[in-house]
Amino acid sequence: MAKKFLKRWMPDPAKIRSNASLQFLGTLLHDPNLFHLNRLSVSRAFLVGIFVCFLPIPGQMGVAAAGALWLRANLPISVALVWISNPVTMPAMFYACYRLGLVLLGAPDRPFHFEMSVEWILAELGYLLPPLLAGSLVCALFFSCTAFLTINQLWRWNVSRNWRKRIDERLARKTSK
């Protein structure tokens, strides 16, 4: 079961709470949902983590941690899911978001000529940023909500399947006696 697999890789909550660099959070880290593996906290963690991984911002892990604290989602899973957008996948993800943003805003596609200079980046930022942000927000909302609903349904299905298995095993034991 996925819960047992995840539990093996989860960090120790006591270690995280006792970390000196996190003492400024006070009692916020004492919420049990931040480290429990239940349907609601894990599905919320997928909502937060996948939403943040589509945002083209620095410090995604910090934003995901703040979102997990705010929504009382599983903290380690929220932060780990941000790494979906890593240096290998980020160019493709953000290019797709940019292209979607162009379609959503009805902006014309301009020929792209890249220069490695600050002047080029500042000149092109005004044109590139609106479609990138629009596409990123739409993708973030779509994929995070889809992940939330999917994890929620998979968790329910897995629990009901395990209950059915237990009932069938109990009936099989009774009939074999």
Image: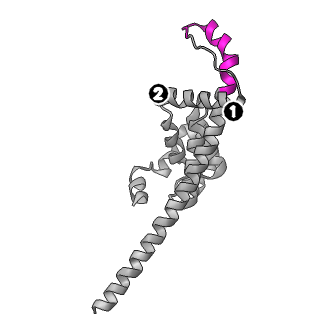
Residue at the spot x=61%, y=49% of the render?
Answer: 145
The magenta-colored residue range is: 114-131
Residue 64 drawn above or below residue 102: below
Position of the N terminus by quadrant: bottom left
Residue 86 locus on image (x, y percent):
48, 31
Residue 25: horizontal and vertical position, in percent? 63, 43
Closer-to-camera residue (29/43):
43
> Which residue occupies 57% across, 40% down?
22
Tell me if residue 56 can be seen: no
Alpha carbons under labels 2 and 1: distance apart: 26 Å
Residue tagged 1: 104
Residue 56, image quadrant? top right
Q: Which residue is mark 2?
A: 87
Q: Residue at x 56, y 42 (%)?
A: 50
N-terminal of the pair, mark 2 or mark 1, is 2
Res 34 label: none
- Amino acid type at image mark 1: Leu
Tell me the element at label 2: loop
Q: Nearer the viewer, mark 2 or mark 1?
A: 1
Residue reaching furthest left? 176
* Disc 1 crowd, CA 10 A, few/some/many (<14, 14-19, 20+): few
Is 41 in front, or is 136?
136
How packed mark 2 is, by other alpha carbons closer than 10 Å (few <14, some 14-19, many 20 or more), is few
Where residue 59 sits in the image (x, y, percent)? 58, 31
**Left or right of residue 101, residue 151 in this image:** left
Q: Is residue 173 visible?
A: yes
User: Which residue is painted at 61% across and 33% down in the image?
Assistant: 55
The image shows a total of numbered marks equal to: 2
